[in-house]
Image (spheres, grey):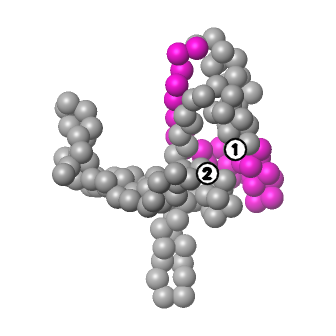
Amino acid sequence: MYTLPKFIEERPNVRIIAIDSIIDPFKEGITLQRRTGLLFRLMADLQRIAVSRQIAIVLMNQMSTRIGLSTGAVVGALGDGWAHRCNIRLLLSAPRNVDAERVAALLKSNSSPETVGRFRICQDGIRDIL
């Protein structure tokens, strides 16, 4: 993270940064309090870079099951606090069959209502399904 600003400065054509998976370095050997503090600082740093450099930053978060009173709900592994820090949340499906239809669900946005889009990944790239 400390080298990211220099990396971007040396490559002025960078317009998107993708980090997969953001939770991996924080899975073990760290207290919840320390993990939360580090992640929130990381998010603040990434938001500052995105605004100052006018680039998109995409963070992938693993999903886990939150057990409720009667059913389980699929939620981001980093929890609600992390989810509220994000400006846009997009949930992408990953079907077992590589050729199957996929779904992109917009769960949170400052400028658009919640919506769902369907698409396929093929040899020619990503194609929407009408």
Q: Is residue 64 magenta?
A: no
Check residue 58 in the rendering and tell me which mark sits there, or answer none: none
Kind of residue at badge 1: Met
Q: Is tag 1's residue or tag 2's residue first in the polypeptide sequence?
A: 1
In percent of width and height, residue 65 lies at 50, 69
Q: Nearer the viewer, mark 1 or mark 2?
A: 2
Is residue 17 visible in the rendered structure shown here? Answer: no
**In this rendering, position of residue 71 left or right of residue 122:** right
> Residue under circle 2?
86
Q: Quadrant of residue 84?
A: bottom right
Residue wearing tag 1:
43
Residue positioned most to the top: 10
Residue located 74% across and 27% down the image: 2
Kindly identify the residue that appears in the image at 64 percent across and 25 percent down. Answer: 53
Q: Residue at x 68, y 39 (%)?
A: 47
Please tell me how crowded label 2 is: few (under 14), some (14-19), or many (20+) other residues with Cα within 10 Å: some
Q: Which residues are magenta?
A: 12-41
36 relative to 3, above or below: below
**Residue farthest toward the bottom in the current orientation of the protein:** 70
Viewed as shown, does residue 86 lie left or right of 94?
A: right
Residue 104, visible in the rendered structure: yes
* Residue farthest toward the front in the current orientation of the protein: 111
What amino acid does circle 2 point to?
A: Cys
Work out which quarter of the rendered image holds the N terminus and state it: top right
Q: Tell me whether the residue at label 1 lies in contact with that at label 2, contact meaning CB atoms closer than 8 angstroms.
A: yes
Report which quarter residue 8 is drawn in.
top right
| x then y, percent, for residue 108 | 52, 58
Q: Vertically, is 84 above or below 88?
A: below
Q: Does residue 35 show up magenta in the picture?
A: yes
